Image (spheres, rainbow, N blue to C red):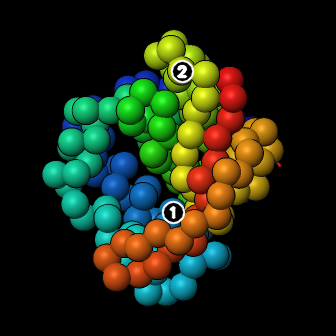
C-alpha cells in the first residue's frame, strides 16, 4: 500500500515514462503468460510514439504518480471502453491499478454509460475478477502476425 498516489491527466511530456512502463511491464509481468515472440511484438508497441500522442490527445488518459515518478497509467476510449491499464513493474500489488480503475468507472458513469467494457490479458484477469468484472468471452486476437489469447470483460456500474 502507498498512501501518496496522485492521479492526473496525462500530457505529451509524459510519453517517455509511459512508454517505458508499457515496455518494461509487458516484458517483466505479462511474460508470465505469453511467449517470447508475443512479448517482443507486444512490447514494441512502446515505440509507436505517434500512436501514444494520439491516445493522449484523443482519449481520457490518466497517469498515477508517486512523488514525481509515474507508476501507472490507464486510458478510456469511446467513453466506456478501458483500452489500457498498466502498472510499473516495481510497483505491482500496491493498489495503483485499483485507484485508476475506480476513477475510470466513475468517468464511464459520468459519460452516461451503465457498463464498462475491456479486453484484457490473461495476466490481468484475476485483478479484474477481484473487482467484480464478468467474462463475456475468451478470444484470440491477431496482432503483427502473433495470436494473443485474451478476454472480453465487462462490469455493470
Ligand atoms: C493487472 C495490473 C494492472 C494490476 O495492477 P496492480 O496495481 O498490481 O493491482 P492492485 O494492487 O490494485 O490489485 C488489487 C487486487 O487485485 C488482485 N490482483 C492484482 N494482481 C493480481 C495477480 N497478479 N494475481 C492475482 N490477483 C491479483 C488482488 O486481489 C489485489 O489485491 P491484493 O494485492 O491485496 O491481493 C498489473 O498487474 C499490470 O500492470 N499487469 C500487466 C499489464 C496488463 O496485463 N494490463 C491489463 C490490460 S491488458
Residue 10: image quadrant is top left
In the rendered image, residue 49, in percent from the top left (x then y), is placed at 20, 55
Report if residue 88 is visible in the image.
Answer: yes
Residue 114: image quadrant is top right
Report if residue 6 is visible in the image.
Answer: no
CB of mark 1 near ligand 1 (< 8 Å): yes
In the rendered image, residue 153, in percent from the top left (x then y), is placed at 64, 48
Name the outermost residue toward the front: 137
In the rendered image, residue 45, in percent from the top left (x then y), is placed at 32, 64
Quarter the C terminus occupies: top right
Q: Which residue is mark 2?
A: 113
**Could you tell me how far apart the alpha carbons at marks 1 and 2 are, in whole angstroms?**
30 Å
Q: Which residue is mark 1?
A: 25
Point 16% across, 51% down: residue = 50
Point 78% across, 39% down: residue = 132
Indicate the secondary structure of the residue bearing disc 1.
helix
Point 46% across, 16% down: residue = 111
Name the outermost residue toward the left: 50
Amino acid at each position: 500500500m502507498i498512501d501518496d498516489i496522485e492521479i492526473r491527466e496525462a500530457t505529451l511530456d509524459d510519453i517517455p515514462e509511459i512508454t517505458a512502463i508499457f515496455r518494461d511491464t509487458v516484458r517483466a509481468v505479462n511474460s508470465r503468460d505469453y511467449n517470447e515472440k508475443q512479448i517482443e511484438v507486444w512490447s514494441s508497441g512502446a515505440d509507436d510514439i505517434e500512436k501514444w500522442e494520439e491516445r493522449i490527445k484523443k482519449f481520457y488518459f490518466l497517469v498515477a504518480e508517486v512523488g514525481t515518478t509515474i507508476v501507472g497509467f490507464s486510458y478510456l476510449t469511446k467513453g466506456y471502453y478501458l483500452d489500457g491499464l498498466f502498472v510499473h513493474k516495481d510497483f505491482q500489488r500496491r493498489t495503483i491499478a485499483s485507484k485508476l480503475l475506480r476513477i475510470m468507472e466513475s468517468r464511464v458513469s459520468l459519460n452516461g454509460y451503465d457498463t464498462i467494457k475491456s479486453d484484457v490479458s490473461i495476466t490481468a484477469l484475476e485483478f479484474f475478477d477481484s473487482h467484480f468484472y464478468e467474462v463475456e468471452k475468451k478470444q484470440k486476437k491477431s496482432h503483427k502476425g502473433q495470436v494473443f489469447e485474451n478476454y472480453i470483460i465487462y462490469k455493470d456500474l
